[in-house]
Image (cartoon, rainbow, N blue to C red):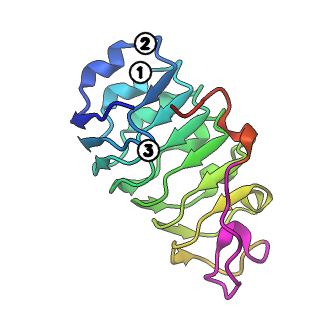
Amino acid sequence: GNEMTGELSSFIGNFTYLEHFYSSNDQTPSSLTGGIPESFGTLSRLKCMYFSHNNLTKPFPLSLSNLINLQVFLTRSNSISGPLPNFKKMPQLVNVWFDGNQLEGTLNDVGALQHLTFLKVNNNLLSGTMPSSLCNIKCDASGNKNITCPLPTKGCCQMTLCGDAPGVPVSPPKTSMGECHPQ
């Protein structure tokens, strides 16, 4: 519940036993600027990553693909631009939120995640086809105007782009946080 300001130091990579990182939460936003340091990718034991509700703008570092134990990836409500991380290299992910950014790419890698139960990626610059596997989980990809039609399932991931009616807003299932618990 303590607000963080400024840029996160690259020294964060020295905390190699770190399993949970919370920079903010929905009730206590922080004001971190810049981006996630490249050294963050050395935290191979990390299970939970919360960078939501900050002022991050820089693209994700390539080193995030080293976070093979990551279960929860939250970077919502920032202004992060650039490509998505390589989610295929984070096979333990169960809950992913990067809504409200300016991220580009497709959802193909996210759709390949076998443990994923919740995805909130609305209001970005995503494109391509919607993976059919995402139609089987709680998902919101609305506000991405370059997802191609037709959808694998009518209304998949709250998409109205293809002429479907808006669905009921999604909430994550109680079991979707893995070993992570919001602070």
Which quadrant would the N terminus be assigned to in this image? top left
- Residue at the far left in the pictured view: 6
Question: Which sits earlier in the primary sequence, circle 2 or circle 1?
Answer: 2
* x and y, in percent, of residue 162 in the image: 66, 84
The residue singled out by tag 3 in the image is 27
Q: Residue 16 carries which label?
A: 2
Q: How crowded is mark 3: few (under 14 residues within 10 Å), some or many (20 or more)?
A: few
Task: Name which residue type carries label 3.
Answer: Gln
**In front: label 3 or label 2:** 3
The residue singled out by tag 1 in the image is 42
Task: Name which residue type carries label 2.
Answer: Thr
Q: In this view, does 53 lie to the left or right of 49?
A: left
Q: Is residue 5 visible?
A: yes
- Secondary-structure class at tag 1: helix
- Secondary-structure class at tag 2: loop
Marks 2 and 1 close (CB-CB < 8 Å): yes
* 160 inside magenta stretch: yes
* x and y, in percent, of residue 143 in the image: 52, 73
Q: Residue 153 carries which label?
A: none
- Image position of 163 with respect to 103: above or below: below
- Image position of 69 with respect to 161: above or below: above
Q: Residues within 10 Å of mark 1 (few under 14, many from 20)?
A: some
Task: Name which residue type carries label 1.
Answer: Thr
Q: In this view, does 86 lie to the left or right of 102?
A: right
Tell me which residue sits at (63%, 43%) in the image.
95
Tell me which residue sits at (50%, 20%) in the image.
44
Question: Which sits earlier in the primary sequence, circle 3 or circle 1?
Answer: 3
* 79 inside magenta stretch: no
Tell me which residue sits at (71%, 74%) in the image.
167
Residue interval drawn in magenta = 153-172
- Residue at the far bottom in the pictured view: 163
